[in-house]
Image (cartoon, rainbow, N blue to C red):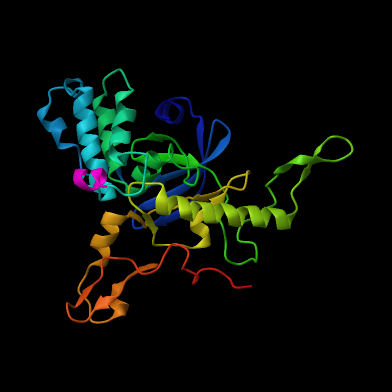
Amino acid sequence: MCEDLCGLGLVQYKRCLYYENGKKVIEARWRGNPIILKSKLENFSSYEPLGILDYQVAAEDLSALDVVFYATMEVRNSLGLSEDTEDEEGGATNGSLAKLWGQKLKIREKSYSRAELASLWSLLQQEEYTFLRVLQDLSTHVAQVLGSCGHFYAVEYLSAGHAWDQNIFSLDEVAVPRLQDQDQAGVPERWTTREMVHRIAISFLDMVWHFDHDFTHRLHLCDIKPENFAIRKDLTVVAIDVDMAFFEPKMRDILEQNCSSDEDCSFFDCSSRCDPLRRRCSPRRRNTNLQVRRHFSSS
């Protein structure tokens, strides 16, 4: 992506969608297609450098296995997954997430330049990037990472949900043809609004079940609101903002805090109960990804 951005001018800025505490979300066009550019911190220098580069004469001295090792350790740290917890049985069949990331890096044959390693390290310090990059080959329900340059990464452009209308998602640009029904001219008919709403609801339930059962550990969503989700043109519901998404081990660490009442045991949309004898919150979440309604209209 860097060549298109810096050399060929094929990435054009459109508008800023979000900017707070250094986090930037930008709408842009890449080779004529809409994309979203994201970065957790404002400046490249705000990220911790890869310390090993200070002791290497050249980045090429790092072997592919070295890069895989350091990247895998950073992914585990970001996702809150130790090697032991990844090897535990958790109801999943897709194996270690961090190891899958390592396999992606091994595919590359040539060595990494110093700039590429510095960029990779800044990206791995962004939890959302790590989530999306690791899960995109395992799930259709997360936004796709399309490329990166420096500390910015590009994801697919999708229209986010909203709470001000009865239909959370705009269906104007969705054109899903029936596979069986055609009009007299042989042109597939468009789904009705009612049919599309039903398909979206089924996709949302499928996403929740998928996050609960299809990974080594349950994936908890702690900031459930319409604007954090979107739909593709095929009506698949997609999580587009996963800053507050945590696998079970990290979720337990977050919840298990000192408390005097149940009110002290809530972390955004994730909550547990306070043990009055221990004065500690239970590490087990008491609600689920479906038991959150405060952001959604009841109409």
Could you tell me which residue is drawn at 26 percent across and 55 percent down? 249
Could you tell me which residue is drawn at 27 percent across and 81 percent down? 261
Considering the whole magenta stretch, tell me its main secondary structure.
helix
Outermost top residue: 110
Outermost left residue: 55
What is the x, y in percent for residue 286? 36, 69
Q: Nearer the viewer, residue 284 or 67?
A: 284
What is the x, y in percent for residue 228? 48, 56
The quadrant the N terminus occupies is: top left
Q: In the rendered structure, does residue 237 fall within the stretch colored magenta? A: no
187 vs 289: above or below: above
What is the x, y in percent for residue 72? 24, 37
Q: Which residues are magenta?
A: 83-88
Q: In the rendered structure, does residue 85 fall within the stretch colored magenta? A: yes
Q: How many marks?
A: 0
The quadrant the C terminus occupies is: bottom right
- Answer yes or no: is residue 236 visible: yes
